[in-house]
Amino acid sequence: MNIQSTRFGELEVSDESVLTFPDGLIGLPGTRYALVTTSDDTPFLWLHSVDHPDVALPITTPWLFFTGYEVRVPEEDARRLELAGPQDADIFCVVRAAEKLDGFTINLAGPLIVHKTRKLGRQIINDAGGYAVRQPLFAEVELNEVHAAGSVPAAATAV
């Protein structure tokens, strides 16, 4: 399927790669999203709405920036996502960009959990506690120390 993006133009997304967030994402419209990347060597992906061309969130794998980050998924959330164990989940955190790097923040308190094969997602409240909604992103590492997002393939490419 092709989706329109005010940020990236037209994107091609396979139907099988669309992520569904049945309860939506806090403060955003829609329930269907795709992972978009602008480069293979960036630590950031975009979680782009399939149905709303102007909705795209920068996200990342939190361990690229916070090696000791811990996530505890509440039992009810794990059940709703049909997770049998940690191996079933991809975990991302939303990034808030700013004009300068020292203004970038990450939401470690409310990670996005995605079932790898079912493509089912949910934003949770991290039961590990003690994490900020706006944690400075570069508090532990410098940008030049961070490598690409790793094994999570993007689902969309520009047409």
Image (cartoon, helix red, strand yellow):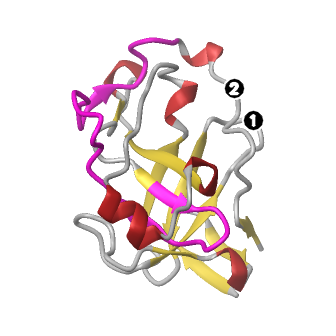
Which label is found at residue 147?
Answer: 2
Q: Position of residue 17 (x, y in %)?
A: 68, 74
Identify the amino acid type marked 1. Asp
Disc 1 on helix, strand or loop?
A: loop
Q: Is residue 22 above or below residue 60?
A: below
Q: Where in the figure is residue 71, as x and y percent of width and height?
A: 40, 38
Please indicate whether residue 129 sits to the left or right of residue 15 in the image: left
Looking at the image, which is closer to me, 3 or 122?
122
Give the residue displayed 54% in from the left and 55% down from the top.
Answer: 46
Q: Residue at x 22, y 66 (%)?
A: 27
Does residue 125 belong to the magenta stretch? yes
Image quarter in which the C terminus is found: bottom right
Question: What's drawn in magenta, residue-wise?
Answer: 113-141
Whether the residues at callouts 2 and 1 have beta carbons within 8 Å, the answer is yes
Q: Is residue 22 magenta?
A: no
Does residue 34 appear to the left or right of 107 in the view shown? right
Which secondary structure, mark 2?
loop
- Quadrant of residue 128 in the image? top left
Q: How many other residues sit within 10 Å of disc 2, few (<14), some (14-19) or many (≥20)?
A: some
User: Residue 41, which numbered label?
Assistant: 1
> What's the residue at 74%, 67% (across, down)?
158
| Lower position in the chain sequence, tag 2 or tag 1 | 1
Q: From mark 2 to mark 1, how far is it between C-alphas?
A: 7 Å
Residue 24's disc number = none
Q: What's the residue at 43%, 26% (across, down)?
A: 69
